[in-house]
Image: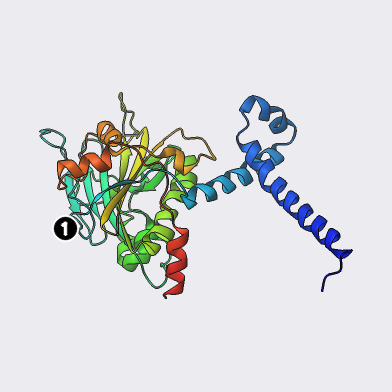
Amino acid sequence: MVSKRKKPKLFRLVLLLTVGFAVYLGVPVGYYFLPWSVRQPVYKAMPGLDRSLRLRGFKTIEGWDGLGLWGRDCRTVMTDGANAEHVYGGNPSQGLKLFSRTRLLENESYLVGYSESMKNPLWVAYRVFDVPRLESGKRPSSFRIDQRTDAKVPGSAFRGTGYDRGHMAPNHAIATRYGVDGQWETFLMSNIIPQVPRVNRYIWKDLEARVSKRYGRYFGEVWVVTGPVFSDPVERLGSGVAIPAGYYKILADESGTDLRVLAFLVESDCPPYTRIKSRLVSVDELEEKTGLDFFPKLSKEAQVEIETDAAGRLWPWLAPAIRYAAHP
């Protein structure tokens, strides 16, 4: 039995720990939201402290965003037969466009709509699904020319340009689902775009990991369409490969009796510590920017319901993760 004299000490200890924890979380979060004009003196005097506080604040907010506790979902009633091995609701369409049409490249682990004129994939579609273990082989050390294309872009085309060779069908997500053969397919240059390193190695990598490690396991399966966004005038590398102004990703998931969708647009100049949630856009916006029609096999009514507005939250994953752990 706790004595009356010990109760105040216990209360003070709990209060002290609570306040300390709140300060530990609150200070970095508050610092993250400070404008550059306020942060600049701290950055100049103590750059390490500035980076540490911003990173801690960013990770805290990203974790909170990921819970998806509130916000609007883009949903419609699920249509029978809309799901396929790699793409949901039909291959992205260019409508009545006559010139510079994409070439469909079929792989075992993903599909590509390839543009010979841009020397880029305009869309790549793949599916992630639950597997007993997320195991992958050693990452290949070389990229390969896709001999099915006329462009035949070599792996050396990006050398010395300052751009990463950005996978559209990700190495890890495909390798863990389709094995070594699928992993090698992701190193075909028809799956690669020029991507700014600070985007490819941070927010884009985090988004891919969220889909592969959380959504693709806890939700059973998720369909993804991803690719570049170009703006006029289109700049090109010395090899003739067009340089995107941004990158998009659309996720489709069958949730109960509904189809739900998330759409993201990440600009090439997206700064570090950008929240994934802040890059949510509508599918309609991506269609306007890419010239592609997504989910063409769905009814017009369904397309309006999932494409008109941007989702207001990321998909909640914590409860599905608990159910997943309880039923191995």
Where in the figure is residue 319, as x and y percent of width and height? 45, 61
Q: How is the image coloured?
A: rainbow
Quadrant of res 142: bottom left
Kindly identify which residue carries mark 1. 80
Q: Nearer the viewer, residue 288 or 105?
A: 288
Q: Please, is residue 308 above or below residue 66 in the view?
A: above
Residue name at image x 31 percent, y 43 percent: 227
Quarter of the rendering occupied by the N terminus = bottom right
Residue name at image x 40 percent, y 63 percent: 218
Residue name at image x 27 percent, y 43 percent: 306
Left or right, 188 with reference to 53? left
Q: Nearer the viewer, residue 241 or 269?
A: 269
Where in the figure is residue 52, as x and y percent of width and height? 67, 44
Task: Bin the neighbour count of mark 1 within 10 Å (Cα to Cα): few under 14, some 14-19, many 20 and up.
Answer: few
Quarter of the rendering occupied by the C terminus = bottom left
Q: Nearer the viewer, residue 230 or 299?
A: 299
Q: Amino acid at mark 1?
A: Asp
Q: Nearer the viewer, residue 60 or 240?
A: 60
SS label for mark 1: loop
Quadrant of res 317: bottom left
Left or right, 68 with reference to 152? right
Report whether residue 120 is seen. Answer: no
